[in-house]
Image (spheres, rainbow, N blue to C red):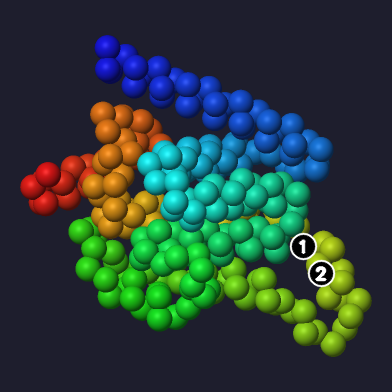
Amino acid sequence: MKMDMTYREIEGIKLNIKQFLDEIQKIAKLYQFEYSQQDRDFYSFIAKHIIFFKYLHQGEKKSYFYKVLISDLYYLILSIIKHEKRYMYVNERSIIENYMRAIMQISLQDDHINESVFQEMRNKKFYCQFTDEEYSLIKNEYVTSCEYIHGGNILNDNLAYVLDECENDKFPIKDRVKYYIRVQDVLKTFDKLIVAEKTLYINGCFHRKKSVMKYLIGAKQVELLFEILNLKGD
């Protein structure tokens, strides 16, 4: 019976995501967005993370950063479809910052994530492997988003050139695919770190629902959770 209930829950999630993706496709047509299978796959990945954070938020409603992450992920999709590249990076930066807040236990009232927080995360001893490559990916993606937000070529002397660049800053599919791969790799690394750092909490949020967790963020994260639980003797 319990397995049957979990199966129904996963089927409900799948239907929810399908309806979500169908709605995105409708919005994409309105904005003349070249909607491809790669886009759909990426938005499915994002949808699963939205639902994952909803489980975490339900377990601890005072943890406001999960709610912010959900909002950021919605707006990340919309900013891509609406060709609003700057806002895409605004949302990406916020996603990175709030995932780090969740992992490092930094409140929203504190200042923006700075270099010292990155170093603290890099030097932290997690119950999982956190490689230099993974750290560099996160840091580089954060730096890129900050640079884009703060202007890029905005100081160019030619006003007309800058205006034209802002107006025609499109996002062709070949560039989107590269971006999607980077963002997915960043989120997968953060998934691993938050499972390692908040193992007991996440275990409680998905009590008797590990198959749901597996569907949302992958088998590797469930395996990691069980490995850490065994190490801690829980």
Q: Residue at x 11, y 51 (%)?
A: 232
Q: Residue 31: where, in percent of width, then height? A: 80, 43
Amino acid type, label 1 = Asp
Label 2: which residue?
165
Q: Residue at x 25, y 49 (%)?
A: 199
Q: Amino acid at mark 2?
A: Glu
Above or below 202: residue 12: above
Q: Is residue 196 above or below residue 161?
A: above
Q: Is residue 99 above or below residue 26?
A: below
Q: Residue at x 38, y 41 (%)?
A: 59
Q: Residue at 65% of width from left, 28% of height from top?
A: 22
Q: Are marks 1 and 2 in contact (CB under 8 Å)?
A: yes
Quadrant, the N terminus: top left
Which residue is identified by label 1? Answer: 169
Work out which residue is located at the far bottom of the displayed protein and give it. 157
Q: Position of residue 215 (x, y in %)?
A: 38, 33
User: How far apart are the two marked residues, 1 and 2, measured between alpha carbons?
Assistant: 6 Å
Is residue 168 at least partly visible in the picture? yes
Q: Quadrant of residue 101?
A: bottom left
Q: Picture coordinates of residue 174 (x, y %)?
A: 63, 53
Q: Look at the numbered disc 2 and give the secondary structure of its residue.
A: helix
In this rendering, position of residue 27 left or right of residue 184: right
Residue found farthest to the front: 62
